[in-house]
Image: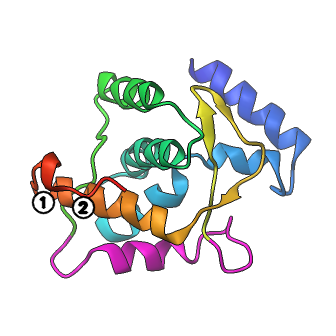
């Protein structure tokens, strides 16, 4: 698995050495993951934050109508099977949605003031270039994840 992953990444980097399109798809999970990492390091490692980001960005893709709900569940279970975290951690006191959004606002994939993410359309497939994400949908994904981290019952969370 590791060898094939590295070979695939090398192939993508060779096609897009300046990260202008296809190569940016390798950043799946990193938009949200880096925001979490910025608030949770060193308690959580980079890969742990990206694993959480992958699950939350799968939820984002589902809410955008690009990914079936079953795929979100499959992705979450896959990360769980490897012992990786899949839920938003409880953030440090005084940190929440505004701080996560601020971290994402400076992501290298952004353009024109919009947060852009790699949007997956299936397990192992994505739209070739990072896509702008409506702020209200990104905030809804994060707010629901933060509510879950705070122990709010799912029935009370606002699934947007």
Q: Which mark is residue 20?
A: none
Q: Which residue is identified by label 2?
A: 146
Q: Where does the C terminus fall, quadrant-wise?
A: bottom left
Please name the residue shown 43% across and 25% down the image.
70
Write down the region rendered in magenta.
92-114
Left-right relation of 21 to 90 = right
Please name the residue shown 10% across and 56% down the image.
152
Please name the residue shown 62% across and 46% down the image.
119
User: Quarter-wise, where is residue 65 in the image?
Assistant: top right
Q: Position of residue 24 (x, y in %)?
A: 72, 51
Left-right relation of 123 to 45 = right
* Residue 80 in magenta stretch: no
Q: Position of residue 146 (x, y in %)?
A: 24, 61
Quick check: 55 above or below 100?
above
* Residue 98 in magenta stretch: yes
Q: Where does the N terminus fall, quadrant-wise?
A: top right
Q: Residues within 10 Å of mark 2 (few under 14, many from 20)?
A: many
Q: Which residue is identified by label 1?
A: 150
Q: Position of residue 112 (x, y in %)?
A: 74, 78
Q: Position of residue 145 (x, y in %)?
A: 28, 55
């Amino acid at each position: 698995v590791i060898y094939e992953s590295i070979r695939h990444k090398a192939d993508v980097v060779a096609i897009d050495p300046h990260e202008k399109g296809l190569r940016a798809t390798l950043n799946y999970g990193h938009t949200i993951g880096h925001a979490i990492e910025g608030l949770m390091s060193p308690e959580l490692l980079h890969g742990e934050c990206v694993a959480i980001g992958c699950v939350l960005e799968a939820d984002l893709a589902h809410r955008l109508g690009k990914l079936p709900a079953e795929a979100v569940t499959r992705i979450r279970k896959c990360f769980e099977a490897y012992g990786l975290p899949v839920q938003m951690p409880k953030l440090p006191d005084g940190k929440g949605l505004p701080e996560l959004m601020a971290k994402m606002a400076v992501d290298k994939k952004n353009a024109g003031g919009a947060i852009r993410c790699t949007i997956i359309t299936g397990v192992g497939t994505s739209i070739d270039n990072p896509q702008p994400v409506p702020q209200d949908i990104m905030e809804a994904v994060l707010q629901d994840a933060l509510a879950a981290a705070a122990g709010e019952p799912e029935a009370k969370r606002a699934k947007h």
